[in-house]
Image (spheres, grey):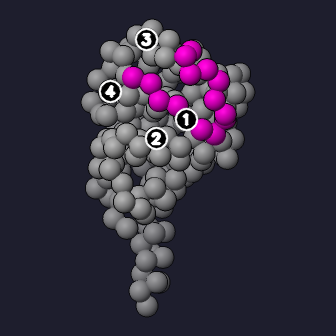
Amino acid sequence: MNTSGKIQLVQGDITEMNVDAVVNAANNDLMLGAGVAGAIRRKGGEQIQQECNEIGTIPVGTAAITGGGRLKAHWVLHAASMELGGSTTAASLRGSTMHSLRLAEKKSLKSIAFPAIGAGIGGFPLRECAEIMFRAVFEHLRQPTSLEAIYFVLYDQPTFEIFADVLEVLKREMRTKAAAGSD
């Protein structure tokens, strides 16, 4: 499986991404408070929160979709990896990442941008976050998909470096497994 062309790492502000959808690191009440959610609300406008209010509470480990408001992205995928005031778990991170990818597929989206879901306010360890999210994306890419570009937009240099390191380790692991399978 060649993922190198589809997965891209970017250091920057996810709200500035010109993609079909950005992913919000959300709580299951879809309240856009602080962190990535707050930045999306500030830049995208109150209509995103209004759409979230219309959706209401969703199960932890799932995702919901709203319009992108004033963002460059047309859509926001709200990946609910925790309850409001709670913390992210490995299962909820994996579930909300996978559900976001399935929602993108349902909309036939070509490009999506993920933050480090749950690693800020959710308190989830960065290295484990990167591994879980990348493995979920690899699993998604094993099947036919409309997605042509999957960005991981990391706000600061230390986070970018951790994600880059984890991605390299996982790619080496996949190459080793592929080589062992071809013997």
The Cα–Cα distance between marks 1 and 2, rounded to whole angstroms, is: 8 Å
Q: Which residues are magenta?
A: 53-67
Vertical arrangement, residue 34 with respect to residue 18, above or below: above
The residue pinned by badge 1 equals 63
Q: Give the image location of residue 162, x and y in percent.
A: 49, 45
Q: Residue 103 got which mark?
A: 2
Circle 3: element type: helix
Task: Judge the density around disc 4: few (<14), some (14-19), many (≥20) Cα neighbours within 10 Å.
Answer: some
Mark 1 in CB contact with mark 2 (< 8 angstroms): yes
Q: Residue 28, located in which quarter of the rendered image?
A: top right
Q: Residue 47 got which mark?
A: 3
Please say whether residue 116 is visible from this viewpoint: yes
Is-magenta flag for residue 146? no
- Tell which of 12 and 64 is nearer to you: 64
The reply, left or right, for residue 34 in relation to residue 4 is right
Q: Give the image location of residue 34, x and y in percent.
A: 56, 16
The residue pinned by badge 4 equals 74
Mark 3 in CB contact with mark 2 (< 8 angstroms): no
The Cα–Cα distance between marks 3 and 1, rounded to whole angstroms, is: 18 Å
Q: Earlier in the sequence, mark 1 or mark 2?
A: 1
